[in-house]
Amino acid sequence: MEVDGGCVIVYGTVYWFVYRFVTEGVVLATTRISDSDRALLQQLAAQTGKQHQELIHEALEAFHRDLLLDGINAAFQRLKSDESAWREEQQERAAWDGVAADGVASDMLHEERVAADRVNNE
């Protein structure tokens, strides 16, 4: 193993490292990324003026959010595919709409539902 200008060469393979330091205590996380990912990270940093750490954090948060929303959408599709459960869901929504008393017109709620159904059916 040989260290060369910010990367480590192990058996002829170059691994770039991403470091994360936390000010409260010392936490060092090392993640291997490919040369192409490192180049992209540098390009994004140059375009945005953000540090690598911030870009990685934003990418991880976006990926986590996407996974969460994909899971929610899959669960919603399973619910809609079960006619009995979907009918029960619609009845529960109608019951809650009646007690909300928040001043929102029911036609606005209907428009929101139509828009949400359109997105979920895509």
Image (cartoon, rainbow, N blue to C red):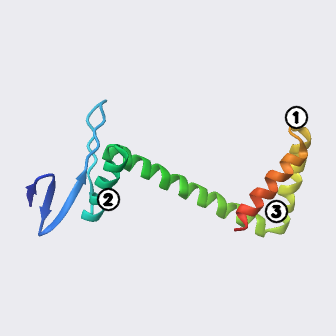
Q: Quadrant of residue 16?
A: bottom left
Q: CA distance from mark 3 to mark 1?
A: 28 Å
> Comparing marks 2 and 1, which lies closer to the viewer?
2
Q: Nearer the viewer, residue 21 or 107?
A: 107
- The disc placed on residue 103 is 1
Residue that sits furthest to the left in the current view: 2
Q: CA distance from mark 2 to mark 1?
A: 49 Å
| Horizontal side of residue 95 vs 76, given as left or right | right
Q: Earlier in the sequence, mark 2 or mark 1?
A: 2
- What residue would you read off at disc 2? 40
- What residue would you read off at disc 3? 85
| Horizontal side of residue 122 vs 53, given as left or right | right
**Residue type at tag 1:** Gly
| Horizontal side of residue 16 vs 46, given as left or right | left
Residue that sits furthest to the front in the current view: 47
Q: Residue at x 16, y 56 (%)?
A: 7
Task: Assess disc 1: are there few (<14), some (14-19) or many (≥20) residues with their C-alpha within 10 Å of its C-alpha.
Answer: few
Q: Residue at x 54, y 52 (%)?
A: 65
- 83 versus 56 height, above or below: below
Q: Are marks 3 and 1 in contact (CB under 8 Å)?
A: no
**Residue type at tag 2:** Leu
| Quadrant where the image shows the C terminus | bottom right
Where residue 71 appears, x then y in whole percent?
60, 60
Where residue 37 appears, x then y in whole percent?
31, 61
